[in-house]
Amino acid sequence: MASGDSGSGGLPSELPVFPLTGVLLLPRGRLPLNIFEPRYLAMFDDALARERIIGMIQPSGGGAHAVQQSPPLFSVGCAGRITSFSESADGRYLVSLDGVSRFRITEELPLHRGYRRVIPDWTPFTADLNEEELTFDRGRLIELLQAYFQQQQLSANWDAIGQAPHERLLTSLAMICPFAPAEKQALLEAGCLSDRARLMMSLLEIAIAGQRGEDDRPRH
């Protein structure tokens, strides 16, 4: 597979992509992966031999395309650099990706060793390569998170959450909260970190209000 420098921070001009529904990677986020399918083992072998960069992206069709070998993809994903790699005794790869930059698909290339590749456009997301200012109502976010985690029966280290820097907190929560795939995609495509923070608070408010509405329904 040929590759080259696109001029966007040394990012490749061809990108292998790993489609996973409901999985979100964001710039400067860290995503652990357990790789076992032969085509994705091949993809990671090739990436390790080159730029060590993989594109994470969601299928756009939801469950309707789950059985397809190459389901339609959303147009925007996020590339991550392999920063941790080990192989298990049964041949699985245990990998960590650190998010680098979002990308937009301009073209999908033919399959290579069973996995998918695209021509990425990095230019809409050049700001991803640098940390940016983030302003949001942190107290309100924590308040919503506590209600949401209680609703979802999730546990959290609230001391660590309270001490986390703004961007790390927002990025980690957006990646781990069990939002629907379309909501995850909306968080990915948010224009800036402040937009993502506002969207996340709106999603939390909707989820909390929806659950309360179900609880208030008359039961017979």
Image: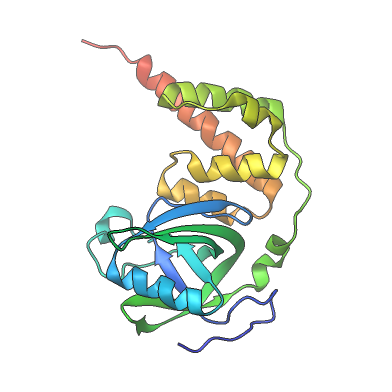
Q: How many marks?
A: 0
For this orientation, the residue located farthest to the front is 89
41 over 211 or under it: above or below: below
- The spot of residue 155 in percent (x, y) is 47, 26
- Colour setting: rainbow
Q: Residue at x 38, y 14 (%)?
A: 216
Q: Residue at x 53, y 32 (%)?
A: 204
**Considering depth in this image, is 124 or 26 the residue closer to the camera?**
26
User: In the rendered image, is residue 15 in sight?
Assistant: no
206 over 171 or under it: above or below: above
- The spot of residue 163 in percent (x, y) is 70, 31
Q: Tell me: 218 left or right of 77.
A: left
- The spot of residue 104 in percent (x, y) is 55, 70
Q: Residue at x 58, y 39 (%)?
A: 200
Q: Residue at x 35, y 69 (%)?
A: 40
User: In the rendered image, is residue 212 in sight?
Assistant: yes
Which quadrant is the N terminus positioned in? bottom left
Q: Tell me: 141 left or right of 97.
A: right
- The spot of residue 191 in percent (x, y) is 66, 55
For this orientation, the residue located farthest to the bottom is 2
**Considering depth in this image, is 3 or 143 the residue closer to the camera?**
3
Quarter occupied by residue 62 = bottom left
Quarter occupied by residue 44 = bottom left
Which quadrant is the C terminus positioned in? top left
**Considering depth in this image, is 155 or 212 the residue closer to the camera?**
155
113 over 100 or under it: above or below: below
